[in-house]
Every structure is written in C-alpha cells, then in structure tokens.
Amino acid sequence: MLARVVRLGVLGVVLALLLTGCGHSNHKAAAKKPAGPLPPTQHFRSRPDLKPPPVNVLSDPGATAPGSVFLAPKMKVLQAGPMILDGKGQVVWFKPLDTHGVSDFRVQRYRGKPVLTWWRGQAPMGVGTGRYVIYDDTYHEIAQVRAGHGYSGDIHEFKITAQNTALFPVYHQLPVDLTSVGGPRDGRIFDGIFQEVDIPSGRVLFEWHSWPAVDLKESYAPPPKAAKGKKAPPDDYFHINSIDVEPNGNFLVSARNTHAVYEIDRKTGRILWRLGGKKSDFKMGPGTNFAWQHDARRQPDGTITIFDNGAAPPVEKFSRVLVLRVDEKSKRATLVRSYRHPKRLLAPFEGNAQFLGDGHVFVGWGAIPYFTEFDASGRVVFDASYGKGRARITGANQDADSYRAYRFVWHGHPTDRPAVALQGDKIYVSWNGATDVFGWHLVVDGKPWPKFVVKRGFETSFLVP
C-alpha cells in the first residue's frame, strides 16, 4: 500500500512513504537496554530509537511567555541529549547522544540568525572537558568552538556575543601550596579561567585566571581530603560557573565556591569589585546574601540576577532567584525581589533563571528535575518535572537532571522525512524537530482520505481507512 502523508504547515511538503509488513521507519531500532533498573522513558512507534525521559506538567499552564522549553537531561536517563518541548511538555525535538555529557542547551544568535548551541564532553567531579557545537534551524552542525592555548572547554557556560565571539570557562590544574587553608604543601588547585574566542578563526581574544587574583582564603570550600594511599583531588576553590558581558564591555563572573560575583575589567583583567563572599565591596542589605550560587546576569534595567542555591552544604531552607539592585557609588546591594518554588526546592548544585522580555521568569532548578515559569506578579503559570521528578533528592539517587532550562521561540525545519510506522490497523507518524506542523492528511492509492488528523504531541496516530 502506497501512502502519502501530507504535512500541513508553513512548508506544505508532500512526502511519499511505503508502509510494509508490520511497520516501517527510516530509523534503526534502539539497542537493547542495559542490565539493571532504569528510570521511566517515553516510547514512540514511529521512532523506536528515541527514548527521552518523561515530562510531567504539574500545573494547568497559565498565560506563559511564547516559546518552547529547552532542556539537556543527563545522569541516569537511558538516553541523554538536547531536548525541545512544547507548552504541554510534549517532545518537539530530541537528539540522543552517545555520552551523557551535554549541557547548556539553548537558542542563541550567530551571524544574525537563530541557532541551537550546547556543550558536549565529559564532566567528572563537576568539571568538564569538551567542546561547543552550533546547529542551524535544519538541525545540522555549522560550527564547533574549542578552547585555545591547549585547554579544553568546560560544561558551565557557552555564550555567543553580538560580535560573534564565544565566552566559556576552563578548569586547569595547577600545583599550589595549600597549607594556608589546611591542605598539603604539594597540593593542586583548579584555576578558574575564562576565554573569549573569535568563533570563525578560533583566535583567543581575552583570557582571565582566578589564580592568583583570588586568594585561596576567599573560598568556602575546604580542600578535599586524600583517600588512603592516593593523592587528594585538586582544590576547586573558585568554581567559575557563569560569564556575562556588561553593557560597559566588562565581564560579570560567578564563582560558586567563594559565594561571590566579580566584575572583571576587559582592558586590564583586574577585579573591579566583588559582590558577596568574604571580601565583598558592597554592604549586603537584608535578604541579599547568597551561597553556592549560579547564573549571575546583568539585566537591562541594571539589576543583577542570581540563582542562589543555598545548598551543598545547605545554608538555607530553599533555593531562590534573587534580583539585586547594586549601587556602585554607595557600594550597597539591595534586594528588589526573590522567587522560590512552591515546594521550597533546595537544589544542591546547578540551576538558572532566564528573565524574559514580558516580565516573566523561567527557572531551571538544576539538580532538582523541575522547571517553573513565574509571571510578572510572581505567580506560577507553568511548573513541570521530568524523570521521576523527586522534589528532594541527592546525587546518590538522582535519575535525571538538566544543568539549565530555558524558554525560547524556535522554528525548526528538519531536512529528513517524517517517520511512519504501521502497526495493526493504525498508522503512527512523527517528524522530529518540525515545529510548524498543525496536522496530517493521508492519501491512499492516489485518493485522499477525507479525515484530517490534528497533530497530537510528538507522535500522531490514526486508523487505516
């Protein structure tokens, strides 16, 4: 039986697919599951090779900001990779990768066009070695970015600037005497580095090092102890986890283990000020202190926003998003607003807050597999979990997490054909990454089937006429 499936949407493409036997797909079946218990996954008859973690929308979606949700689930999920979801938590695009090292998946602009970007590599001990990839709207790789000077790019940040340069961190081991902080004389540290690199040429335009600019005694993280008969791991005293460009061209850097945010002079590399931590240049007003934080950003109104983990080890009862007014003349920091999850989630690591143009805030809770959207009044208008979605978990029993979560408007136009499977008296059809599909028509032996089938989630099914 020859069936033509018509895609109704922006492109209006007509594709012919042959349905034979008990089913047909353009994609290979998934490999056998490894032994041992696994977290739940989604299954699609037209794409048996895709097994993303399930997503559970926990609240009736309110008036959310426009756009899709972007995650990069990893850890113990059967498959890891960048994933786009619609407003109901249904998969739009999923790319399973052969490594669980995927992070910071989002939409950015490169050479004037929207692109997909993420980091890919390995991240033992929370420190990454890898590269950054850029995909176009057809889901093809158009560029890779690697660290310069013999380094390897870290997991925590990949930001494309308006000048088509890339900002990202690097962790590099150095031998350092740690006796001043109770460690060994022949100790090691992770030097927190960030680079700005010209994407087309790979040329390093700027490079900054935390050591020796930031003293070991600024850290709240004690040097790790050595296991019996082994050398102690490097002291991650700084732990750089976000880099942003200020309106004045300087850099805003977050260091988790010093509980501080730094402004770095672009011309000299000098630290202009510290916000928070043991050597804060600002008087911290009520509610402004933060600990083990992530994702420090300068907003268009001049405020600085921070994802305040407050955990690992816990110093707060819940994680929160802070909006701080920072007066650089009077050297005072004031709390403008804060956001917390209704379940008072406490994320021991990871997390981010994306401030959208309409006053909404989209929050990824990092190690806690939740993502939430607040409206301009602070009301929750969207809340979802993925994997098993435990509200209070530790790394020991965690089944899935995403370093960050975002919401972006995205239009994807895959160049591969829709996937179709025939099982019994049903046809199953999907098109991984196609964002503008509204529904499907079926044409059998040159004759159109009168019923129009509205697209339902990632995969739509209908009875064979």
Image: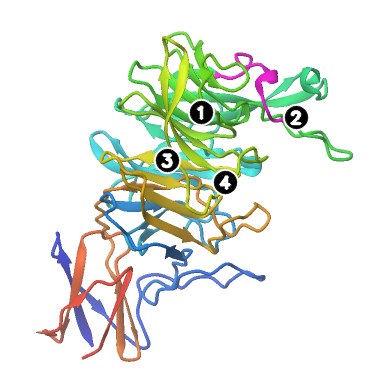
Q: SS class of the residue under badge 2?
A: loop
Q: Quadrant of the N terminus?
A: bottom left
Q: Amino acid at mark 4?
A: Ala
Question: Badge 2: few (under 14), some or many (20 or more) residues near its Cα, within 10 Å?
Answer: many
* Numbered range of the magenta stretch: 209-223
Rendered residue at 15%/63% (across/down): 9
In screen coordinates, is 432 left or right of 209? Answer: left
Q: SS class of the residue under badge 4?
A: loop
Q: CA distance from mark 3 to mark 2?
A: 30 Å
Q: Where 62 falls versus 287 (above or below)?
A: below
Q: Is residue 216 magenta?
A: yes
In depth, the one of 48 and 222 nearer the eye is: 222
Rendered residue at 81%/19% (across/down): 179
Of label 3 and label 2, which has the lower sequence position? 2
How far across and how far down the image is residue 108, in percent?
32, 39
Which disc number belongs to residue 353? 3
Determine contact: label 1, label 4, CB under 8 Å. no
Name the quadrant containing residue 460: bottom left
How far across and how far down the image is residue 445, in percent?
15, 87
Q: Is residue 449 magenta?
A: no
Determine contact: label 3, label 2, CB under 8 Å. no
The kind of secondary structure the magenta stretch mainly shows is: loop
Q: On the image, numbered disc 1 is attached to which residue? A: 288
- Mark in front: 2 vs 4: 4
Q: Residue 303, can we see it?
A: yes
Q: SS class of the residue under badge 3?
A: strand
Q: On the image, numbered disc 2 is attached to which residue? A: 223
Q: Amino acid at mark 2?
A: Pro
Q: On the image, numbered disc 4 is attached to which residue? A: 347
Determine contact: label 3, label 1, CB under 8 Å. no
Rendered residue at 31%/53% (across/down): 68
